[in-house]
Image (cartoon, rainbow, N blue to C red):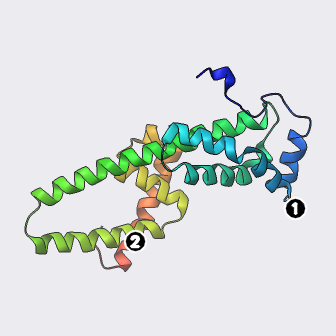
């Protein structure tokens, strides 16, 4: 297939791109629908080509991101270029999550095969559930650093890069987040 023959939304900057994005950012009725009607099919097609599956979910995630970030659109590129970047990032995130999930499932299956008697496993499972609920109870900013550090095994410097913060700031956040998690766990009767 000749790439030039594939129909894409115009790359040229439309005079109304900035106006449309401002309208979406300010919540003008009907503006978001105009954007979705114009770009839903090309975004869905791109997601389908990149992922094969989950394209509908990714397409929804792209437009949720647009709603969240409409005020940040600066008009340095066309809306289609901006949506393409968002779609690529959403697809990358989806692929990463799928890879992490597969690794976790493989690890979990290995652990179950290698694990001790079922009562010990049940106790560990109960404790894991309590810990997971405690992590879920943390504010999002605290949860991010705890998950990245302890569940993802990321170093403070990696976390700093991911969160666009200094290493020192991440270490302080991590210290405070551990304290908050410790408090929640002690209220649950679990020794951290």
Label 2 Cα neighbours within 10 Å, binned few <14 / some 14-19 / many ≥20: some
Q: What is the CA distance from the residue labelled 1 to the residue labelled 2?
A: 39 Å
Q: Is residue 108 above or below residue 8?
A: below
Q: Horizontal placement of 69 versus 162: left or right?
A: right
The image quarter containing residue 184 is: bottom left
Residue at 68% x, 40% y is 42
Label 1 Cα neighbours within 10 Å, binned few <14 / some 14-19 / many ≥20: few
Nearer to us of marks 1 and 2 is 1
**Which is nearer the eye, 46 or 131?**
46
Q: Horizontal placement of 121 versus 58: left or right?
A: left
- Which sits earlier in the primary sequence, circle 1 or circle 2? 1
Q: Is residue 158 above or below residue 11?
A: below
Mark 2 lies on residue? 133
Residue at 16% x, 60% y is 112
Q: What is the quadrant of the N terminus in the image?
A: top right
Q: Residue 170: x percent and y percent?
A: 49, 46
The tally of labels here is: 2
Q: Residue 177, labelled with which disc?
A: none
Label 1: which secondary element: loop
Mark 1 lies on residue? 29
**Which is nearer the eye, 14 or 186?**
14
């Amino acid at each position: 297939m000749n790439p030039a023959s594939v129909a894409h939304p115009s790359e040229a900057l439309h005079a109304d791109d900035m106006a449309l994005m401002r309208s979406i950012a300010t919540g003008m009725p009907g503006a978001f629908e105009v954007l979705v009607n114009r770009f839903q099919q090309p975004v869905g097609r791109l997601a389908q080509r990149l992922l094969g599956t989950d394209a509908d979910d990714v397409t929804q995630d792209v437009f949720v991101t647009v709603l969240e970030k409409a005020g940040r659109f600066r008009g340095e590129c066309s809306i289609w270029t901006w949506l393409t970047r968002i779609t690529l990032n959403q697809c990358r995130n989806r692929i990463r999550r799928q890879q992490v999930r597969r690794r976790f499932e493989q690890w979990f299956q290995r652990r179950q095969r290698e694990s001790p008697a079922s009562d010990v496993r049940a106790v560990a499972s109960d404790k894991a559930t309590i810990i997971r609920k405690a992590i879920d109870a943390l504010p999002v900013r605290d949860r991010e650093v705890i998950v990245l550090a302890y569940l993802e095994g990321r170093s403070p410097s990696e976390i700093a890069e991911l969160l666009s913060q200094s290493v020192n700031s991440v270490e302080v956040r991590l210290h405070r987040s551990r304290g908050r998690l410790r408090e929640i766990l002690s209220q649950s009767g679990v020794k951290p």
